[in-house]
Amino acid sequence: LVGLLIFQSSSSLILEYFSGLIEQHQQIVFFLTMLVGAGGNAGGQSVVLVVRSLALGREVDFSGQLQTACGLVAVLTVVTFGRAWVQGVDAVTTLAIGCSMSAIVFISVIIGTLLPLSLFKLGIDPAHSSAAIQVLMDISGITL
């Protein structure tokens, strides 16, 4: 946990790097927790499905995970656009937030699928993926 905490601290460096952009588009800040939370949750669900499949000796359905990612992207992006519209966010910022949601959720499902599979193949307990996916998606979400 200490290692993950130190690694997650890089989020502040990323925010500092993008401080100029954030100053120009201050409304982005109101969406950061939603974006990183969606990534962590989507990735966490994928981790659980993969770890469960591995524990039961079943083959992991990667194409099914891709379909799930596409479905989540479709729904969550529409909801994101709706929330931005309700909050009166300008069109360019709304587009950026919606595209970020799409990328974050899709990437999180892919990483949430591949991370436990990779750990399993390396002989490491794939259950360790659950903590790592949250930190990885926090950092990825802030970056995207």
Image (spheres, rainbow, N blue to C red):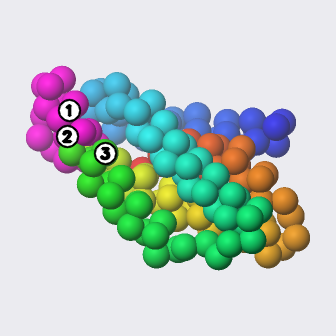
Magenta stretch secondary structure, dominant: helix
Mark 3: amino acid: Leu
Picture coordinates of residue 136, whole percent (x, y): 62, 50
Left or right, residue 136 beside residue 80: right
Identity of the residue drawn at 41% across and 61% down: 68
Left or right, residue 59 beside residue 65: right
Image quadrant where one finds the N terminus = top right
Q: Is residue 30 above or below residue 11?
A: above
Magenta stretch: give its range. Answer: 79-97
Disc 1 packing (10 Å; few <14; some 14–19; many ≥20): many
Residue that label 2 marks: 81
Observer-nearest of 115 and 5: 115
Residue that label 1 marks: 84
Give how far apart the Cα atoms at labels 2 and 3 are.
Answer: 9 Å
Picture coordinates of residue 90, whole percent (x, y): 13, 34
Picture quadrant where residue 27 is located: top left
